[in-house]
Amino acid sequence: MGRKGAFITTAKEQIFQEGKKIKKIIDATGAGDAFAAGFLYGLLKNKSLKWSANYAYKIASQSVSDFGLRW
């Protein structure tokens, strides 16, 4: 859902994580991949869905704050 947030559901739990406001987006290339990596990191560290989603937004917001892929 991008800047609108993320709805995450499992067989046991459902959460909504609000999106984060970012001062200046430079390049959104790879933001989804960065979000997924941050979220999976949290799950692999046995963190809650809420913690994982919040961490994922932090990682994705750092990702869009600079230029993405360059050749």
Image (cartoon, rainbow, N blue to C red):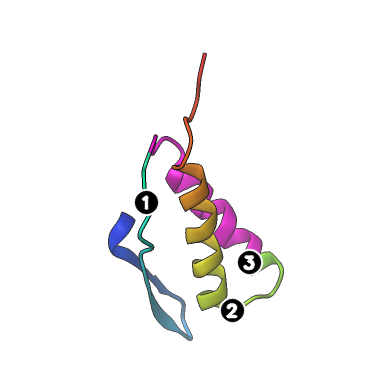
Marks 3 and 2, Cα distance to the nearest angstrom? Answer: 7 Å
Q: Which residue is mark 1?
A: 23
Q: Is residue 58 magenta?
A: no
Marks 1 and 3, Cα distance to the nearest angstrom? Answer: 25 Å
Snapshot quadrant of residue 48: bottom right
Q: Give me the residue at 69% from left, 65% from top.
A: 44
Q: Which residue is mark 3?
A: 42
What is the tally of numbered marks visible in this picture?
3
Magenta stretch bounds: 26-41
Lower position in the chain sequence, tag 1 or tag 3: 1
Q: Decide if residue 19 is on the left or right side of residue 30.
A: left
Snapshot quadrant of residue 5: bottom left
Q: Is residue 57 visible?
A: yes
Q: In the rendered view, would you say 24 is above or below 48? A: above
Lower position in the chain sequence, tag 2 or tag 1: 1
State if disc 2 and disc 3 touch (CB < 8 Å).
Answer: yes
Q: Which residue is mark 2?
A: 48
Q: Residues within 10 Å of mark 2 (few under 14, many from 20)?
A: few
Q: Give me the residue at 46% from left, 81% from top.
A: 11
Kind of residue indicated by mark 3: Gly
What's the magenta bit mostly, secondary-structure-wise? helix
Q: Position of residue 50 (x, y in %)?
A: 51, 77
Q: Residue lying furthest front in this view?
A: 23
Quarter of the N terminus within the rendering: bottom left
Q: Residues within 10 Å of mark 3 (few under 14, many from 20)?
A: many
Which mark is nearer the camera, 2 or 1?
1
Q: Give me the residue at 50% from left, 43% from top.
A: 63
Q: Secondary structure at mark 1?
A: loop
Q: Residue lying furthest bottom in this view?
A: 12
The residue closer to the viewer here, 69 or 14, is 69
Lower position in the chain sequence, tag 3 or tag 2: 3
Kind of residue indicated by mark 2: Ser
